[in-house]
Amino acid sequence: MMNEAFESVSILGFRVFSDNLLKIPIQGHQSRVINCSISPNGYGLAVKDPEFKEALKKTDYLVLDGVYFALASICLKGRNIKKNQGPEVFRHFIKRLDKTSGKAFFLGSSEDVLEKIKEKARIEYPSVLVETFSPPFKKEFSREDNREMISKINAFQPNVVFVGMTAPKQEKWSLRNKDELDCNLIISIGNVFDWYAGTQKEINPIWFQLRLAWLIRIFYRPEIFRRNIGNQMLFFWHLILMILKIKKQSTV
């Protein structure tokens, strides 16, 4: 993990980025990881999945995705955490690449989604050179799968690799392969691929500002809510136990 100067909050065993995204340089460093994964759901997944937990702990910049994770910091430390959710992170970095004629590689999702991303980016960010690759849809990638993904990325030598494989698969993949990738940043943004491509309805930014994007997601994708409700409840249960001092806080 980089020892750069940026504001962060250490809470529940994770060091969470709490600063302006401009503090994260693009050029000048090799294969640093940004994960938009710390949320009540992400916490619950990490409790159950040690490898995912390790991936989040070793992330160079772990940014707040689920805003209600900040409740833990407010309740236990009296500090809020700056919100930098997936769509905001994506647009921030692709805009910066557009200003510098940079390169962006999109890894994940289907060929159809990736083609829509390329078409839209060509219009909105004409100075960004874009390449994509759709890996096979399987629970675990083979050694050959990983070699092909790494080869495609390194042949392009992007500044930023956007990874959209959903959690916890994307975070684990980024950590396992970061040292093999010839890029500056690896950013896991999951469902942002579908939102940007238009294959799923994008949540209006106002709902993120009101901290109610989670509620809109329930209406758009109720199956995701049902799948994740157990992880979310585990987070709130642990938080209550910590507030009552029945459970000890984890340390970074």
Image: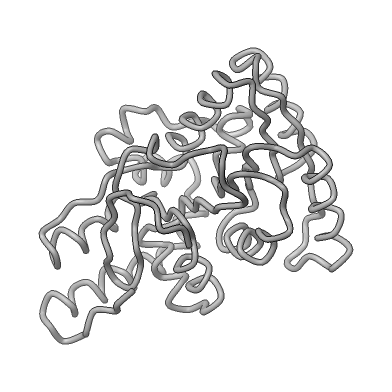
For the point 21% across and 63% down, the residue is 72
Residue 241 quadrant: bottom left
- How far from the left and from the top, in percent, is residue 21? 39, 38
Q: Is residue 101 above or below residue 249?
A: above
- Quadrant position of the C terminus in the picture: bottom left
Q: Is residue 167 above or below residue 233?
A: above
Residue 122 quadrant: top right
How many numbered discs sit on the rendered protein?
A: 0
For the point 36% across and 46% down, the residue is 214
Task: Return the residue nearer the eye: 245 or 57.
Answer: 57
Q: How are the colours assigned in the image?
A: one colour
Q: Is residue 205 above or below residue 119?
A: below
Q: Is residue 14 above or below residue 30?
A: below
Residue 189 quadrant: top right
- How far from the left and from the top, in percent, is residue 26? 53, 38
Q: Is residue 83 left or right of residue 24?
A: left
Q: Is residue 144 left or right of residue 67?
A: right
- How far from the left and from the top, in percent, is residue 177? 69, 62
For the point 41% across and 62% down, the residue is 41
For the point 68% across and 30% down, the residue is 103
- How far from the left and from the top, in percent, is residue 248? 22, 84
